Amino acid sequence: MTTKKIILTDKAPAPIGPYSQAVLVGETLYVSGQIALDPATGNMAGNNDVELETWQVMRNLEAILKEAGMGWQNVVKASIFLKDLSTFGVVNNIYGFHFKENPPARETVQVARLPKDANVEISVIAVK
């Protein structure tokens, strides 16, 4: 039986509910959706600016990947949730900055509302 290992770092926001930042099962890492919470304060970063929020989301994801001994090159799947699909271009540019070669599979959807009234949430799956 494959065991699961909970990944937790103080370099990313603590979970705000009954979930883990990430779970490693075998060689596969499942990272929970990240919003623009500042891990130092627990407050939303970005002052409701989707660009600033997206940079914080990517920093949070990167910290979790690093804690698991992985990086952007290990990401095979991403899910992006946007409050307003008209912000897709801004989010896509920042997201793309992290995946210059061999980007992962992905979907991007507009949702009615995100936790803490965030503008963007991103989750990833990575493999060693």
Image (spheres, rainbow, N blue to C red):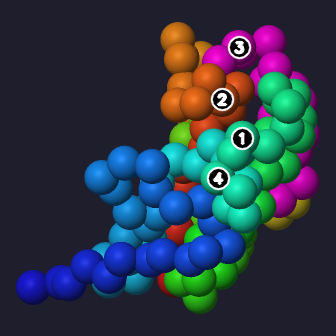
Calculate the distance from the C-alpha at mark 3 to the C-alpha at mark 2.
10 Å
Tell me which label, 3 or 1, sits earlier in the chain: 1
Q: Left or right: where does residue 65 sit relative to residue 92?
A: left
| Residue type, label 4 | Gly
| Residue with the mark numbered 2 | 118
Tell me which label, 3 or 2, sits earlier in the chain: 3
Which residues fall within the magenta stretch?
81-99
**Residue 23 higher or lower than 98, as above or below:** below
Assess disc 2: are there few (<14), some (14-19) or many (≥20) residues with their C-alpha within 10 Å of its C-alpha: many
Tell me which label, 3 or 4, sits earlier in the chain: 4
Q: Residue at x 58, y 30 (%)?
A: 116
| Residue type, label 1 | Met
| Residue with the mark numbered 1 | 44
Calculate the distance from the C-alpha at mark 2 to the C-alpha at mark 1.
8 Å
Q: Residue 39 versus residue 105: which sits nearer the camera? A: 39
| Residue with the mark numbered 4 | 42
Whether pointer 3 and pointer 1 mark residues with C-beta atoms closer than 8 Å, the reply is: no
| Residue type, label 2 | Ala
Calculate the distance from the C-alpha at mark 4 to the C-alpha at mark 2.
13 Å
Observer-side mark, 4 or 2, equals 4
Tell me which label, 4 or 2, sits earlier in the chain: 4
Tell me which label, 2 or 1, sits earlier in the chain: 1
Please tell me whether residue 19 belongs to the stretch shown in magenta.
Answer: no
Observer-side mark, 3 or 4, equals 4
How far across and how far down the image is residue 110, in percent?
59, 17
- Tell me, yes or no, if residue 29 can be seen here: yes
How far across and how far down the image is residue 103, in percent?
72, 56
Q: Left or right: where does residue 20 sit relative to residue 18?
A: right
Q: Residue at x 89, y 54 (%)?
A: 97
